[in-house]
Amino acid sequence: LTSLSLFMSLSLCLKGQPLPQTSRQAKNVIYLIGDGMSLPQIYGAMLATGRDLSFKQFPYCGIVTTRSASNEITDSAASGTALSCGKKTKNGMVGMDPDSIPVKSVLEAMAEQGKMTGIVVTSYVTHATPAVFYAKVPKRSYYEDIAVQLLNSDKVNVIIGGGRKYFNQRKDGRDLIEEMQNKGWKVYDTLANIDVANSKYAVLANEGHMPSAVSRGDFLPEATKTALQTLSKHEKGFFMMVEGSQIDFACHESDSATMVAEMLDFDKTLRVALDFAQKDGNTLVVVTADHET
């Protein structure tokens, strides 16, 4: 493991022209995170395919160190908290500072400004990276507690991913899916036949994590398109976080073939975001990684 991550951002100009001094503030933000992704993964995917990826369209890029408040090598909980809340914390902590004091995330701040918000991932929706945008727990493994916080959140409008077992196969016997529906959520188990006019829905498309990119098809880019259909209707704009969760999984297994497949899936999803931003003209796209695996 190393502690490098890649940060790239897309401003209102996608072709690399410098921004004018009086550039206006973007109405929408699409924040893409490649879990475990850095220069080796991006360039590895380019080498494997013999072509450039969408990353090369970005006019601005940089490299950051990602050590946590407790370890030289971070984990996704601490690094995700830094990305979402602007605060370094100890490994394993979600949405809290090192003293276990909850800190506000950018998603929560955007919601307080009246924007709609969305999260799209290929992991559990209660996994560390998505959780840091809406939950506050001292240990990332508290998946059932994180699920309850999602149930009670008034800041998340759309959430798509896996992890259904933490909602309806719980140790406490609660059926959070039923409770979510009673609180006004629409809950689906597939991307098919979603009423995108709903302002609050969850798609829990697998009991655990979603299958790997080789098996799940275009779930991530299609889920991103689905969420955008809902969020883009809001006149005050939106904030959406999209995670390529399983780049990290493949790298932990030293599985280069799956890593490349996950990177290409993430690139296809990035293409969805870029196409939307180009047509919309008022959307900021940021791509980053929580750490490199």
Image (cartoon, grey):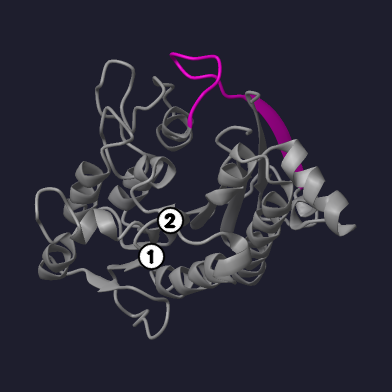
Q: Main secondary structure of the magenta part?
A: loop
- Residue 18 visible, this orientation: no
Q: Work out which residue is located at the far bottom of the displayed protein and give it.
A: 193
Q: Nearer the viewer, residue 111 or 165?
A: 165
Residue under label 1: 206
In the picture, residue 280 is in which quadrant? bottom right
13 left or right, relative to 73: right
Residue 267, magenta (yes or no) = no
**Other-residue count near label 2 (Cα within 10 Å), few / some / many at <14 / 14–19 / ≥20:** many
- Disc 1 + disc 2, Cβ < 8 Å: yes
* Residue 53 image point, x, y percent: 79, 56
Label drawn at residue 96: none
In the picture, residue 93 is in which quadrant? top left
Instruction: Give amino acid for label 2.
Output: His
In the picture, residue 78 is in which quadrant? top left
* Residue 230 image point, x, y percent: 40, 73
* Residue 59 image point, x, y percent: 77, 46
Q: Work out which residue is located at the far right of the displayed protein and give it.
A: 50
Give the residue at x 36% y 81%: 194
Name the quarter where the C terminus is drawn.
top right
Q: Is residue 170 above or below residue 77?
A: below
Q: In this view, does 249 lie above or below 157?
A: above
Disc 1/disc 2 C-alpha distance (Å): 6 Å
85 left or right, relative to 242: left
Name the quarter where the N terminus is drawn.
top right
Residue 71, magenta (yes or no) = yes
Give the residue at x 48% y 35%: 83
Instruction: Give amino acid for label 1.
Output: Asn
Residue under label 2: 209
Is label 1 in a helix, a strand or a loop? loop
The residue stretch that appears in magenta: 59-75
